[in-house]
Amino acid sequence: MSAATANNSSGPVLDWAAGHGPVTGALSATTGAFAVATTGAATSMPPGWALAVGAAGALGHTVVGVRARAAGRTLATRASCWLLGAGWTTWAMTSGPLTWTALGSLATLGVGIGASARAMALHEEAREEEALAAAQWQVARELSAERREIAAEWVERIQRVCQITVRVLAVEQRPTGTGFSIDAELPPGGATWQKIAGESARLSADARLPHGCTATASPGIDQGRVIIDVTTVNVLAEERTYPSDYSPLSLLTGIPWGYRTNAEQVLAHLREQCALVVGPTGSGKTNMVHGILAGFARAEDVLTWVIDLNAGSAGLPWVLPALNGEITTPDGKPVRPGIDWLAGTYDEALLMLDAAVRVAKQRKMRYQSLLARANTDLLPIGPAIPQIMLVIDEGAEILASTDRQMRRLAEKILEVIRIARAMGLRTVLTALGATSSVLGNLMIRREAKVRVALTGGETEGMNLDKMFPGTRGLRVEQAPYKGSGFMGTPESPAALFKAWRILPNQIREIIAATTALHPVLDDVSVKAAGPAYVRRWDADRTAWMRDPTPGDRTPAAGPTGAGTELDLSALRSDHPAEQAPPEEEILRQFRAQIDAQFATAPDPHTAADDEETTPESGGLNLSALRSEQDSPAQQAALALLLAAGTEGTGASAIARALADEHGTTRQTVVGWLKAWVKDGTAVRVGEGTKARYVHHRHAPEQPDES
Ligand SMILES: Nc1ncnc2c1ncn2[C@@H]1O[C@H](COP(=O)(O)OP(=O)(O)OP(=O)(O)O)[C@@H](O)[C@H]1O
């Protein structure tokens, strides 16, 4: 009976597990012992029973304590309470518990237990923490046991497959749980990381990795080390949209073009390199070009010029929403196109390439002193002197063409590639196939080392060995998904990758988000590029973009629905009542075009200022100027004003720059500047001889728009 009572932890006396404080704990031990002793004496219980009660109490406590994860030393104290109590009980039962000696000794025992328990309370707290740390250490130990297991497995595998005995220094597991990386030391005697890289396919097969997962080797911290990245989850199979972080990028720190099998971004470093993107029809090439243009749009030191002779389809989604005034910045201002120039026709492409060659040559001459000062032969590219990235869709096919006209374009493309590296003009060429006419070209082989092969499951014309010479173990079947393939750069050896999916809506979002980021072409380059550049958004030059061939457009449903595209005649009739009056709509679109033409977004006049927009009232005076005085000289002057950035410029400087080509006098320029200040296009800053004019985009504060 007593033993049963002792084992019953919910009993009134023997309940040690119910959160005793130091005193009640001791009391409960002593009173419990007293109760058993009195009961035992009264019922003539044999003294051995009491000992059994104590032992049972101690045992019960240990079990409960273990369940409650009490610290080891606390358990010992609790158990000893029981054993002490049990010893007293045995003695008292034999000598009679109600003697003073017996009671006094029980009280002493209780106090002793109480004191010990008080000390224990403090100790317990510290001990709990210690225990927690120990538990964590245990987890870490188990983790490193897992790492040790991975290390042992791969040392053995590399030995068996590559006949190289490496020593693993570290195993890092990816937080995303998609695989791990092994940092290993190569054995002395000439083993290289390339030898392991060459056996990638066999290692992957040996490890029975899922499809799309690889074990790839790359150089370690020095030539005696190797990093082996093992992917265990196939991230290439899933569709990932272009990251929604549109923060500014720089060409100098690399532009992300997609992600690797370990879900890490892969960067293209294009300050000196050209790029070649090969992808057969349906592989996701157009989508990838959009991803590339998105990256360039985010770069503060890049202006993108696009040539796409397939009706400009690669570039149109980056231009039309801005040209048509369909989108605005978050604060309601019109936006600049996401690219700086789009050539969709042969003639426009020729103009662009000629301008590019002139820019390269002029930069070389005019920036001599800058190069000398900076002690470099590479033009210091930045927001003030941006790099021009020429993206030529199916450019490789232009290079391979035997057509006489195409050969002219090809020669100019090759000239840009050949002469313009130091001066900050580089190309991204796409190709339908990695044909020998593309890769056989020495200039491409030498200058275009940023390479992408989009396979999308296509095996035809996919000569990966030629695309990525020196890299073995790449197999087309590893990348059967659209938008996936291989990418290699001088910084990042060729390996599996996938481009992000990007849809027209996101392109529009990026155009709006990056409009203020785009640099302005430097003065030297604007002058070199000449009217061909300054007038690139002219109505006659962009007429092809506005060709109303149905279905040949981006999904351009504008804010007012049907009729918002640039079919101006359509705007004059049949308007639903809720639409803006046709005149306003026409003017709004006209403004947007002109704004885009001069790359002058944001428009100082919002749609609400429509009374300002009639030519008579000045409005966006560029419109008025277009009709009355739309001269190349004036456009060049405006371009110079823009190019002058926050520094601004003056009438004399502009007149000097225009004198040779246009014969413009200072007096004329003064007249223009005054008109521009009046209509808000320019802001006059400084006084007296320090007075200068700043384009409103670069003005310290937006000018008052009234
Ligand atoms: N990165 C990607 N992720 C997921 N799906 C993609 C990706 N890229 C492309 N796709 C899919 O593949 C289809 C074809 O893509 P895209 O039009 O870019 O290919 P393409 O090679 O340019 O073909 P075409 O030359 O016929 O236009 C897309 O409609 C889309 O469904």
Image (spheres, grey):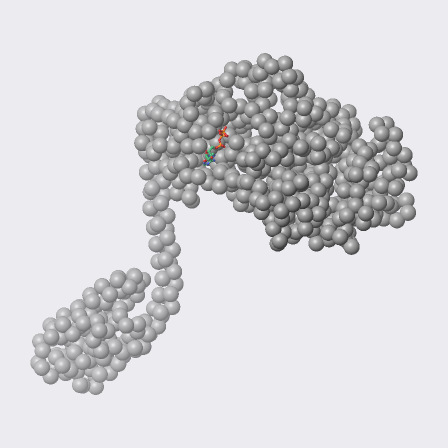
In this rendered view, identify the residue nearer to me: 149 or 377: 377
Q: Position of residue 66 (x, y in %)?
A: 26, 62
Q: Quadrant of the N terminus?
A: bottom left
The image position of residue 404, as x and y in percent, is 63, 14
Whether 657 is drawn above or below 585: the answer is above
Taking depth in this image into account, of 348 and 610 the one nearest to the observer is 610
Dividing the picture into quadrants, the one containing residue 356 is: top right
Residue shown at the point (88%, 41%) measured from the top left: 670
Q: Residue 343 location in percent, x, y?
A: 64, 29
* Position above or below: 320 against 116: above
- How many numbered circles are shown? 0
Give left or right: position of 624 versus 665.
Answer: left
Place residue 551 in its image quadrant.
top right
Q: Which one is in front, 157 or 662? A: 662
Which sits in the foreground, 347 or 469? 347
Q: Quadrant of the C terminus?
A: bottom right
Left or right of 423? Residue 317 is left
Res. 629 image quadrant: top right
The reply to whether residue 122 is visible in this rendering is yes
Residue at image x 24%, y 83%? 104
Identify the residue at horizontal 87%, vertical 38% (top origin).
669
Residue under the point 49% across and 35% down:
499
Can residue 426 be seen at all in this image of the molecule?
A: no
Q: Is residue 556 above or below residue 380?
A: below
From the top left corner, tell me how far across and down residue 363 is, in percent.
Answer: 74, 27
